[in-house]
Image (cartoon, helix red, strand yellow):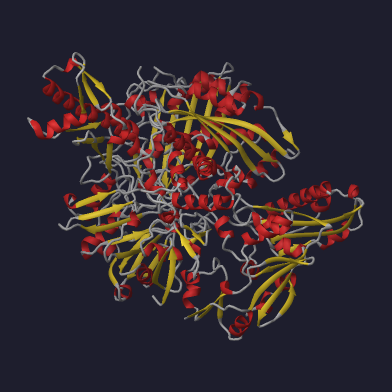
Amino acid sequence: MSEYLNIGKDKRKVDALALAAGEPLFTDDFPLKNPLHIAFLYSPHAHAKIKSIDTSEAESMPGVALVLTYKNTPRVLYTSAGQSYPEPSPYDMYMFDEKVRFVGDRVALVAAESEEIAKEAVKKIRVDYEILPALFDIEQAEKDGAPVLHNGEEHVMIPSAIYRPEKNLAARIAFLYGDSQKGFQEADFVHEASYYTHIASHCALETHVAKATFDQYGRLVIITSTQVPFHARRIVSSITGIPLNKIRVIKPRIGGGFGSKQEVLLEPYVALVAWRTKRPAQIVTSREEYFVSGRTRHAMRSRIKMGVKNDGTVVAMEIDDLMNAGAYGPHGPTVLSNTGAKVLPLFNKINNVSFYADCVYTNLPVGGAYRGYGATQGFFGLNQHIDEITRKLGIDMAEFVKKWHIKTGETSEVFKAIGEGRQGHEQVVTSCKLSECIDEAARAIGWKEKRGAKRREGDKFYGVGMAVATQGSGIPLVDMGAAHMKMNEDGSFNLFVGATDIGTGSDTVLAQIAAETLHVPSEKIIVLSSDTDLTPYDVGAYASSTTYISGNAVRVCAEKVLDQILKVACEMLECSKEELALGVEEVVHTRSGRRLSFKDIAYYAFYTKNQFQIEDSASFISPISPLPFCATFAEVEVDVKTGIVKPLKVVTAMDCGNVLNPKLAEGQVEGAVLNGISFSLCEEYLFDDKGKMKNPNFWDYKVYKTTDLPEIVTILVPSFEEYGPYGAKSAGEVAINTPGPAIANAIYDAVGVRMYNLPMTPERILKAIKEKGIG
Amino acid sequence: MEWYRPKSLEELTKLLSEDGALIHSGGTAIKEDRIKSASRVIDMSGLPLGYVKKEGNTWHVGATATLRDVIDVLGKEECFNPLVQALKCTATTPLRNRITVGGSVYLSPLWSNFMGPLLAMDAKLDVAGKLNGTYAYEEFLSNKAKFQGCVVTEVSFQADASTCFFFDRFARTANDYSALTVTLGLSIKDEVVDEAKIVVTGCKKVYDRLHAVEAGLKGKSLKAVDPERIFGDVEIEFADKPAGSGAYLAEVAKVLLARGFGALACVR
Amino acid sequence: MEMKALFKINKKAYELEFAPNAKLLDVLRDNGFTEVKCGCREGFCGACCVLLDGRLVNSCMIYAASVGEKEITTVRGIGNTLEPHPIQEAFVEAGAVQCGFCTPGMVLATYALLQDNPNPTEEEIKQALDGNFCRCTGYVKIIDAVKLAAKKVR
């Protein structure tokens, strides 16, 4: 194979220098002319009816332009989840409701001349609440007599998951094949345990920000920190009634999303305020609002039961997941289905599987999309369970996983059975280097030497653990991305994609794909992305869809454009296509040796004869979702007197197919890994007994800084995915699924205690150590 | 509202003679509504109080010296000084560049890292305003009400070459505020403990000087000391905190104390 | 807006109006210096970092009224897209810029570090950047960038 021109190269991110130079690129960097500032009134109660709400004093304050409550906003049920229509999340929220369902729920908003006035006016809104009993415990949610959060017109648009709001059930998914009860009887031993993952915040550095203004023609322009500009446009229109063709949504640079911005959170409000007042309107939320009234990772209890034979065969597996939706259900059903859909296929040789999962409402902050999207929760339990059973069997977990994981050419019953919103689709794994990932990472951590070595230095005990995971690359037959390209006279190209670069570097990678197809350096591709007026549709940045879905759209589009270039060359050279070869930015007539530069061809097409604009478009959907894979091996130090765990070294090997841009791919792994580490060790939502978050700030919600870093090693293990653009698969999510369980397994290796709950704080570890009687 | 920026201690004292001024040093601990409602703000930054200097055997740290200044100057000469150890793990680089010694000592919040070291070093404060003069830091801590309407102008302590210090703390991450700190100072002559200074901070009492343990150690041969037993018997109460329950923190304090003693016993 | 003062920002003088309780962060952003970002308003994340007389500080924790004569440097004061500073170049080359929201603060933290310590160890780099939170990169390539920047600047 000839060397790639752009693929596999550490091409500079197209926006990196501008960002390093502090250019105005983020939503709040674009000043509106004389805008109204919006402030929200949030509920102080976890569950209450609004008996009366008096906004008169607020409205009469000088500088206040508009006050909105349930009384004067559209009574339209929707989901804030940024998903393809019809969204698989329950339609269970109104812009404002007569009821509040968590501390931090929205009660009203004030739009005023300044943020200060808006906040002052918010304080003047008088609300009389009838406090209702609140529900915080997921295990109680479906029981008779539990407080019911949603008992009105709430409904689902598609029946992919069972929805019973009268039982607080936001989603139920069940799936089975074989006969797990029979399997358990055939087993030599059965192991059952429950694992608990917790609520966490994405902590994107930029909070939620949205601005709405009018262009010269009276159309509404929304500039917003979003992962889903097209979903935002559609959902804003359907809630507010503003015609879709009058709305333009622009995504500028985003200060991180990680799933928190796969949500149409603020846009309907800024849009409605602007539309009603005919003034620009904006809201910049605080960190506290981001923690409390934004979205979180769904907490989950996962009960896993495995029936195992002494030769290592898992003959039966039962998974019973109970997930916490929070007060509303955006992404509830799909995150829930992922805890099975992404987790079960990894071990496809278990013949008897039963998967049963419920997602329930509670009066707590709202769960949403968060990198990993259910796989993170599922893999925490599964990897520890495998650690446990391989220890019982006396075999190496690494060898076990290498033997039993899904391989290239294989399939799993689960692909067809569970989809992400709609039905599942059969697929065969077409690229998998997980065993190689395991080998490389094991070698890098010193697995053979350190595993079970029981190294001790005084009160410090050392151990190593591993975990594996997979994810997907887009949602089959749901996610669609499109691209449009046009050629300029000088041989450069404009590439228009709906695809949403949220810091991941997709603009850069898509330029590389286009450039490779056209055989030009990627610097010749000018990318414009995520503007609903100027770029074609794309679902947005989620489900690890950009490289694979949007990337393929770009590839197909570039192929079509190349075709046109060659046709013009044929006309110019008066020859047939077979006589042409492609050079770098040029076409060569093989017989005569005559060369035509892309510039020559473009000038001809623009100005000389049969003039036309060389341009084309393409869309892409996929019937499959190629699986990326990763393995993480972690070494920890446990202080048995204090319970303090220090991750020393965390090695992750990832197979994301053919690597399009090594530095960007590594960057995805490194960010995901550190997020996974701090998620599992120190991030925590602390609630009082009335459901109020006690620590909506970085003072008490701890995340890792440079001084907390373990040694992080990233190993890219390329495979070649035949259906991916230049062999690529996704890289954005998979590596967040493994650090937590790898560390938990390393803790077990060090001190012999199994940590079933996250986060694994020093106090919890010390308690477990004492119960075990060590040190 | 008036924002004053006095240039001399005389000006400062004159401004302090009137009631109701808000003192602004680094400003990092002042909430916005306090400034908003203040009629008079006295900004310390113009005063010649940014020094960190040694005169004879005494270190003098001016009120407007930043934590960074102390680490740079004191740390250069005495890198094992417990105050240096404490400040190095306080907050973050940009905050240490701004937080002043005077401001933070006046506040001495529960999570201060410097509290233990200053107590262990028998530090003194110079104050101006309602009271003028030099007071023991311990007196200030135990009776903050007495010092209302005062401003700290200087912190001073002895450079004590004969005492070896140990500082440690418990927090959730490297830059988290401390849930508790332990400071130990030992002066040892011929393998015998001459004097011990042991302070725990962050507890319910805010700070706890373990006088009983100190007395018990005095004159003891190092070999005869079992730190785990001595500190295991100590009763220090902590409130429940996000970093851990009161019971857990009490246990960690004992572990850190025992380890600190062990480290010091080896060092000399 | 009750107060007015002269601010020295990136070697230029600006007479700006502000409320007494206005933070330097907001006075800067409201007057066009949008390169200074807001991430937390509690002095944790460092997105708001500027240099004050060459020292790295959180502008969200500083009252504008107290700045006085001190020189403020934002990231645009050390380089721009047309004439980037070697530190900014290093961040680009090392792949240390993902969403870029933390980058201005990180660049200034690096600048301040290399001014004091042109040849920092990895530990010293981590210390110098301990006030800058990043969720995208895991800090790995940022530390690489600082090492590269140190080489370039030397």
Task: Please say if B209 is above or below A254.
Answer: below
Give the camera-side residue of C71 and A516. Answer: C71
Q: Nearer the viewer, residue A585 or A86?
A: A585
Q: Percent x, y for residue A239?
A: 24, 53
| Residue drawn at the location 38% of the way across and 70% of the way down | A116
Image location of residue A707, percent across then percent down: 59, 47
Residue that extends furthest to the left in the rendered view of this protein: A610
**B134 relative position to A160: left or right:** right
The answer to whether B53 appears left or right of B44 in the picture is: right
Q: Is residue A475 above or below residue A142?
A: above
| Residue A273 position (above or below residue B32) | above
Numbered label tally: 0
| Vertical relation: B260 (above or below) C31 | above
**Residue A348 left/right relative to A264:** right
Closest to the observer, A5 or A503: A5
Residue at the top extreme, as displayed: A591
Q: Is residue A145 visible?
A: no
Which corner quadrant of the image does residue A628 belong to?
top left
Q: Is residue C38 visible?
A: yes
Residue at image x 65%, y 55%? Answer: B88
